[in-house]
Amino acid sequence: EFDPRDYESEGGMMILWDDVKGGKYPWDENYYLPEEERDPDFDIRFKARHATDSASTAGSYATGVKTFTGAFGVDIYEQPVRTIVEKAKMCGKSAGTITSVPMLHATPAAFIA
């Protein structure tokens, strides 16, 4: 039976997140301490390797295709993929994006870039 707590050592709320290596919170104090003062089990690069950024998350959401951190509009092999907005336009449909943030923020941009 699935239990997201199987991956937690002391708490936290992200599935497959190691709260010792990555810190209990994204703002864990270990990120701000000099190396010699950090918890010895803490890995300052864990977050970069295990938590994606908003651009790639939005890109995957807009295309339905897995990508990698720091990218959108391409698959994991760096091949271009079309967004749902582009596919709708190719079918002769009207398409657009409505947003409460500037269009160049990662989430809306992923749909129109």
Image (spheres, rainbow, N blue to C red):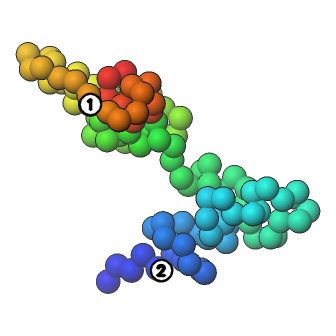
Pick whichever, 67 or 97, lies toward us.
Answer: 97
For residue 6, the mark is 2
Vertical side of 29 occupied by 106: above or below:
above
Q: Residue at x 32, y 23 (%)?
A: 112
Name the spot of residue 43 as percent of width and height, x first.
72, 60
Vertical side of 48 occupied by 21: above or below:
below
For residue 98, the mark is 1
Q: Residue at x 48, y 70 (%)?
A: 13
Tell me the SS state at disc 1. loop
Name the spot of residue 24 as percent of width and height, x first.
62, 69
Pick whichever, 98 or 47, lies toward us.
Answer: 98
Pick whichever, 56 or 66, lies toward us.
Answer: 56
Q: Where, by quadrant of the figure, is residue 26 drawn?
A: bottom right
For residue 37, the mark is none
Tell me the SS state at disc 2. helix
Q: Residue at x 69, y 63 (%)?
A: 28
Left or right for 33, reference 87: right
Vertical side of 16 occupied by 94: above or below:
above
Q: Which amino acid is tagged 2?
A: Asp
Name the spot of residue 94 as percent of width and height, x first.
12, 20
Q: Residues within 10 Å of mark 1 (few under 14, many from 20)?
A: few
Tell how many labels.
2
Q: Residues within 10 Å of mark 2 (few under 14, many from 20)?
A: few
Q: Residue at x 61, y 65 (%)?
A: 25
Q: What is the C-alpha distance between the residues marked 1 and 2?
A: 38 Å
**Quadrant holding the C terminus:** top left
